[in-house]
Amino acid sequence: MTDADHRRDEPAFEAPWQARAFAVAVQLTERGDGDLPWETFQARLVEEIEADDDAVEGTEDVYYEQWLRALERLLVEEGIVAGSELEERTREFERGDRDASEFVIGEHGHSHDHGHGHSHSHHDH
Amino acid sequence: MTDTPDRPTRPDDPSARARAIQSLLVEKELLTTEAVDRIVSTYEDDLGPQTGARVVARAWTDPGFKERLLEGGIEAIAEVVDVPDDLVDVEVVENTPDVHNLVVCTLCSCYPWAVLGLPPTWYKSPEYRSRAVREPRTMLREQFDQEIPAAVDIEVWDSNSELRYMVLPQRPPGTADLTEDALADLVTRDAMIGVERLGESTTVEQ
C-alpha cells in the first residue's frame, strides 16, 4: 500500500451488491424487538473473516464476500429462511427469471442495481 | 447440488445472492426495500469523516464540550451533529503530548460509523488488524509515514460490537485564530483513527 492509497477517500461501496448486503444486515439487526441483535451477525462475520485470514489480502470484494457469507449463514442457521429456498431464489436471479426491478420503488426507485442492461430475460429451465 | 442445505457457501454471483436475500426477506416482511435504500443512502451520502471533524473542532474550541465528549461519547456528539439513534456508542480517546492513541478492530471491522462513516479498505485488512496490535510504532512508520517519538506512549484501542473508538487529536500549533469551521478542515479521517498524528511535526520527510 502506498501513502496515496491511505490518503484517498475510498467510495463507500464498490458495487451495488456490497451496498445491498451491508444494508440488509444493518436493517435486519436493528429492529427493536431484539430477536436478532447485531452480535448474532457480527459473530458470524468474525468467523468468516477468520476462515480467510492469511489466505487473502484485504480488498472490498473479499470483505463483502465474507459479509455475504455471514449473512447467508445467519438467515439459514437462525431458521429465518430455508437453505433450499435461498438456493432456489439465488438461481432465479442468476437465470434472469427475477431481476432488480422488483426492488424499484415508484419513480425514484433507488435500486442501486441497474447496469445489467436487460430488463427481463426469461429462460425456460 | 451437493451442498448441504444448512451451509450455503456456494461461490455464486454475489449480486444474485444479495438480491435473493433481499427478495426473500421482503416477502417475509422482515424488511422493506425502502429501509434498505435509506440505509445505503445514509452511509453513502450522509455519514463520513466530516462529522467527526466537526466534533473534534468543537472539542478544540469549547473545553466544557470536550469534557462531556470524553465522558459521554455519543451523547455529547449528538450536541454537534445528527447521529442515527441506533448506532453503537463511541468512546473518544484523547491524544496528549505523552500519549498517542490508535484504533483498530482485530476481529473484523468494527468502526465508529456515526462519526467516520464506513472504514477504508486498509482498516479491514488482515495486515492492519494484526500489526496495529503487534507492532504499532513500526507499522505507523512503515505504512503511514508517522514517526511517533520514543517518549510518546502508543495506546491501541480494540473496537468491538458494543464500543467503537475515535481519537481526539491534539490541536495543531498556530491555529489560535481559526474558526471552528476552519479547524474542522484540518481534521483528517486518518487522524481520528490514529494513523496520523496532528499537533506536532512528526511526519517523516519524504
Image (cartoon, rainbow, N blue to C red):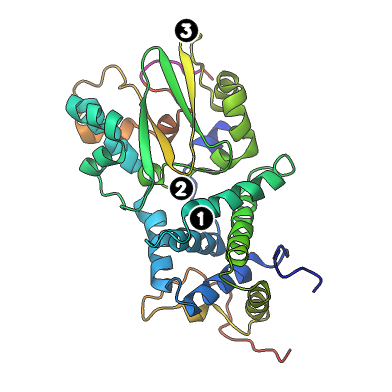
Read off the residue under disc 2: B118
Residue B183: tell me if it is visible. Answer: no
- Chief SS of the magenta region: loop
Which quadrant of the view contains residue B94? top left
Disc 2 is placed on an element classified as: loop
Residue placed most toward the observer, B8 or B141: B8
Residue for point 59% across, 82% down: A98
User: Label 1 sits on what residue type?
Assistant: Phe
CA distance for labels 3 and 1: 39 Å
* Viewer-nearest of discs 3 and 1: 3
Note whether A81 is above or below B183 in the view shown: below
* Left or right position of A72 against B181: right
Q: Are marks 2 and 1 in contact (CB under 8 Å)?
A: yes
**Marks 2,3: beta carbons within 8 A:** no
What amino acid is labelled 3 in the image?
Ala
Instruction: Where is residue B116? Give x, y as percent.
Output: 39, 42
Q: Nearer the viewer, residue A28 or B122?
A: A28
Residue matched to label 3: B151
